[in-house]
Image (tube, rainbow, N blue to C red):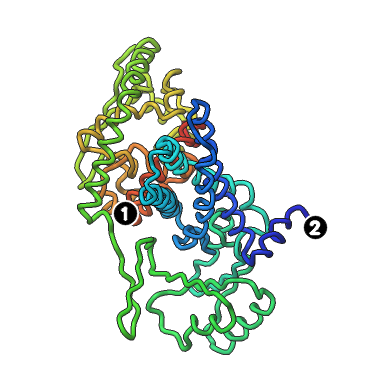
Amino acid sequence: MKKTSRWVHLASLFGISAQKFLLCLFDLLALLGTALAVFLVRATFGGLDPVLYHWVVPMLLLGPVFGAGLGLYQTVSLAPHRELKALFQLTSLLYAIILAVLFLSKTGDAYSRIVIMGSWAATLFSMPLMRSLCRRLYARRRWWGKPLVIFDHCSEGRELWHYLKRHPDRGLNPVAIYDLPDAPEDMRCLFASVAARQPKAMALLLQRVGKAQDVDVITEASRYFSSTLVVPAFGGNFRVHWLTPRDLGNAVGLLVRQNLRDRRRLFVKRCLDIGLCLLGSALLLPLGAVLALIIKLDSPGPVFYRQTRIGRGDREIRIFKFRTMVCDADRVLRDMLSSDAGLRAEWACDRKLKCDPRVTRVGRLLRKLSLDELPQLINVVTGDMSLVGPRPIVRAEVKKYGPVFDEYCMVRPGITGLWQVSGRNNTTYEERVNFDQYYINNWSVWMDLWIMCKTVPVVILGHGAY
C-alpha cells in the first residue's frame, strides 16, 4: 500500500472520505490533547484525583458527532469564519454538557474549575490550529477533496477552476471542465459520458440566472450524478454568503441579508472594538512609548504622521500613524517620480514602492511588522475606524474603486482586513478592491474574529509588507 493511500484505506473502513476522517481525527486530538495538557499542568500543583476525570473522555469523544451536526465535515468546506463559529459552538456545547452533568450529579466541588474552564478556553484556540495543520499537511495530496467536474454555461468556469486549484482546503478537487451544450440531447450525452468515467465525482453547474433554457439542467444532472453543486451567476461581482433558501410554494427564493444594515450587529462590532482596545492598552501603551522614543532618536521630525483618508459615509477623517519616512517625503517622492519612469508606473499601479528610499531605518522595521499603524487605535476609540475593515483610502483612489466605492462607504475602514491577511502588497489593486467588496457583502462578527486571528501570523512573519 502506498504511503499516500493509507489514510484512504483506513477511512474506507468507516465508510467516509479520507478528508473527513482526518478532520475528525485532528478534532479529537485537539479535544483530548488540550484537556490532557491542561489537566497535567494543573496536576503539577497537586490536589487532583485522575480517576475523577475518566468520564470526561467519552464526553469529548462525542465531539465529531456534534461537529457533523454543525456542518464541520461537509464535502464542501465551510467558509473560514463560519467554521470558526461552528468550532466555538461545538467546544462550548461539549463543555456545557460536562458542566450540566457536574451540576445534576452534585459533584462539582470535587472537580477543578481551572481544569474545566481552562480546557474549554484552550480548546477554542487548539481546534482551529489543528484543522489548519491538517489542511497544511494533506490538502495538496491527490486524494484530498471530492472529485469535481465543472459544467460551464456562463464563461466563468475557468476562473472557478483556478480558484479551487489554488485553494484545495475548500474540499473540492476539479478533475475536468466542459462547456455545457444548449441542445438537450447533447447535454444528456455529455452527462452520461462524464458520469461513466467519473462515477464518484460531484457535478458543478454554472448557471446564468434568468437565462431561458429548453431543459431543466439541474434535474438532468441529478439523474447522472449523486450530488450536484449549482453556482448561480448573477452577473457583476455579486458574491454573498448570506443567501438563505426560502420555500415560496411553487418557487424557491433566495433571501439576501446585508449584516451591515443590522444595527444590533453593528453595536456588537463597536463593543468588540472598544473592548479589545481597552484590553490591549496595558501592553500597547508602553510599547507605543518605546517606539516613539526610538523614532525620535533615529531621525529628526515628529513622532506621528497624520493623513486625510475617506471614512464611512464618504466623510474625510484624519488617521494617525507612526512616522516611517523622512520629513520632506513628498518632495523626495516628486523628485523620484519625475526622473524615473519605472517608479512612476509602479506608483501609478497601487501607490506603493517596494524599495522606497523615503523610508527610514526604523520605519522599514515598523512597516514590516505593521507597528506603524498602532496609533490608529486612537481612531478606533474615537469612532473613525474599526479594528477590522477595508483599508482607508485617499481621495485619489476613489476612481479605482469604481461602483464599489458606494459599498466601501457603508463601513468604517479598519486597521486590519481581508486584504491584509490575503497577500497585502503582493496582490494587485483590483484584487484589493475585490477583497474589500467581499468583506462588505459577507461581513459578520465571526469574520472579524477570523481576520484578527489571521492577522497575528501575517504580522509576525511580515507577509506582503513593505
Quadrant of the image occupied by residue 271: top left
Is residue 181 at all visible to an observer of this figure? yes
Which residue lies at the image location 62% right of the left edge and 81% below the top edge? Answer: 190
Residue 226 versus residue 352 in the image, above or below? below
Q: Which residue is mark 1?
A: 404
Query: What amino acid type is highlighted by mark number 1?
Result: Val
Is residue 345 at all visible to an observer of this figure? no
Locate residue 114 relative to residue 444 in the image: left or right. Answer: right
Query: What amino acid type is highlighted by mark number 2?
Result: Met
- For the N terminus, the quadrant is bottom right
Number of dots carrying numbers: 2
What is the CA distance from the residue labelled 1 to the residue labelled 2? 53 Å
- 1 and 2 marks in contact (CB < 8 Å): no
Q: Nearer the viewer, mark 1 or mark 2?
A: 2
Closest to the observer: 261 or 116? 116
| Secondary structure under the numbered disc 2 in the rendered image | loop
Which residue lies at the image location 33% right of the left edge and 52% below the top edge? Answer: 444
Query: Where is residue 253 drawn, in percent x and y?
Result: 33, 75
Closest to the observer: 244 or 192? 244
Which residue lies at the image location 66% right of the left edge and 75% below the top edge? Answer: 199
Q: Which of marks 2 and 1 precedes in the sequence?
A: 2
| Secondary structure under the numbered disc 1 in the rendered image | helix
Residue 259 versus residue 326 in the image, above or below? below
Q: Residues within 10 Å of mark 2 (few under 14, many from 20)?
A: few
Query: Where is residue 79 drawn, in percent x and y?
Result: 45, 56
Tag shown at residue 14: none
Query: Where is residue 408 drawn, in percent x and y?
Result: 29, 49
Quadrant of the image occupied by residue 442: bottom left
Which residue lies at the image location 43% right of the left edge and 39% below the top edge? Answer: 111
Q: Which residue is mark 2?
A: 1
Please identify the residue farthest to the front as the structure is shown: 106
Locate residue 143 relative to residue 267 in the image: left or right. Answer: right
